[in-house]
Image (tube, rainbow, N blue to C red):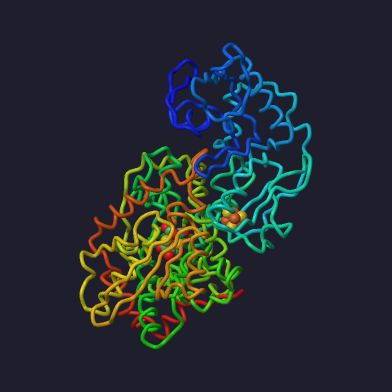
Amino acid sequence: MNAWINNRPVTFEEGETILQVAKRLGIFIPTLCALLPLDHTPGTCRMCITEIERKETPGKRELVTSCTTPMLEGMAVFTHTPEVRHRQRQQAAWIFSDHDQDCASCVRHGNCELQDVALYVGLQNNSCNGRFIAKRPVDTSAHGLLRDVNKCIRCGRCVEVCRKVQGISALTLDDIGTKRGVGIVGADRWIDSPGCVECGQCTLVCPTGALGEKDQCDTAIDWFDDPDIKTIVAFAPSARVTIGDEFGLEPGKNTEGQLITAIKMLGADFVCDVNWGADVTIMEEGNEFLSRLRTGGTLPMMTSCCPGWVTYVEKHHPEMMGNLSTTRSPQGIFGALAKTWFAKTHNIDPKKLRFISIMPCTAKKEEAARPQLARNGMPDTDLVITIREFARILRRYGISLPTLEPSKYDSPFMAENTGAGMIFGVTGGVMEAALRTVHHVVTGKNLDGIEYLPVRGMEGIKEATVDLGPGGSVKIAVANGLRNAEELIQRVKSGKADYQFIEVMACPGGCIDGGGTARIKNSYLSHAAARAKTVYQIDRARVYRQSHANPDVIRLYDEFLGKPNSELAHHLLHTYFTD
Ligand code: HC0
Ligand code: SF4
């Protein structure tokens, strides 16, 4: 079908809105509420006003919102007429009339979709500025999240992602008049939410600073500066393929070497890799699975390295807590071994050692605060810094990541890692890494070709049957995104599926799209494919691709733990859950 935008001929499919056609063709129309990847077009911000002329009424102009108006055959659309510009400017002024404009301290400082719109409409001398602010308290009650209703523009994107993608519906727009804004269903504060799991997906789509990560940059900086404190910093598998977005690099760019350089420049005493912890997780979790299989333990065993998922089970399905693997997450394992094995071998008083992890995740802050992951009154993981926070620290130091020379880890100690550890960062990766080792333990042989393709890809639920030779076969399933995880749970509970091993990552696509990664404006999951591709490239390039082949992990068991699931390993590397 044919139409025109700004006198340019365009083609479109029946049912497409003006905004969809414009976006597809790269013609900019401002919007603060519409989020097309989620089919979210509430039409509330009114910024996408355009003028149209219908074929049937030539010369008669109408003002419409482009997100809710279908493109029609022969229609002429104008995005930039004086009337459109006037109306958009007026609309932006009204949005600012009850918006807290303390931009300097805002978590979106310099990266705000509302500021972008003000620039687009040429907003100057706005007499409406902050005239109708009804001050509401800022909610900092959650471990990793911030909610500032004074900055909410009521677009409803957060409500939609929590409902549609996660199937949780923890958020709502509540109250009336100028007090209306993002609220918590069933509670006044985020921490008391009966449903929220702190996954942070809502923060990825918020156009302003109403929802964000809780900023703990100063704690990290203080520790780097303290001569009495030794810091050990390790970053998540997906950190190296996601932080580039914060510095304008191409999506999925591997910045591992630059990250190591940057962390050293900040003054960290030791730079390590959470991938190493992932290899240890596989040693423990793989053997835990085999032990459950052989001794009639609770099945299906469900992975427990994703804290959003763990909280989901605790809050929404406490009857299934026994299915969660007791093996700690790679972060939890890293912290425990940093404060014991690492401290001992490096002759450091654990009380003066701080482990900082750099994560794509807001829920990891909640995980780190769990009392069962502490020893002697101190958390094993002292601080979790999200990708967005870490990029902020670098900006505060004037460090531009892309310009740095890459460097290598100083020593293999808690840094040497395998391709198996690396693929933890993408959906299906924990399962694939576990199978690489479990297959080897049971059959003495490598999984054919090492790579296990049935668990790869963005599909919501993936299933497979894995042949373990004389050990029989096991049925496995992988879910990403909590709505899909709920579907999997229902299959198990209704007896429709008899899996033995399940992997769940709370965020769609896995950690590569974690709630602590860079916010890509007015889009959702748009960099997932590029990030996943790089993760698998890094896997292929690693010298070792199976966790049990990691020489530094072999050394850990030889020198310290004995064997996987030993008494000491259980004491240090396993955990429990509470509802
Ligand atoms: Fe993940 Fe992890 S893979 S949860 O997504 O298991 O956040 O990248 O660091 O701990 O390794 C996040 C990423 C991690 C942990 C690992 C696991
Ligand atoms: Fe929903 Fe996750 Fe946001 Fe909580 S953090 S409100 S579960 S999207």
The residue closer to the viewer here, 106 or 57, is 57
Drawn side of residue 293 relative to residue 50, left or right: left
Q: In which quarter of the image is the N terminus?
A: top left
The residue closer to the viewer here, 76 or 563, is 76
Drawn side of residue 538 relative to residue 197, left or right: left
Residue 175 in percent (x, y) is at 77, 47
Q: Splitting the image into four quadrants, where does ligand 1 fall?
A: bottom left
Q: Quadrant of residue 144?
A: bottom right
Q: In which quarter of the image is the C terminus?
A: bottom right
Q: In which quarter of the image is residue 545?
A: bottom left
Above or below 517: residue 122: above
Extreme bottom residue here?
Answer: 295
What's the residue at 57%, 70% (across, down)? 370
Residue 225 in percent (x, y) is at 51, 54
Above or below 348: residue 361: above
Residue 504 in percent (x, y) is at 45, 65
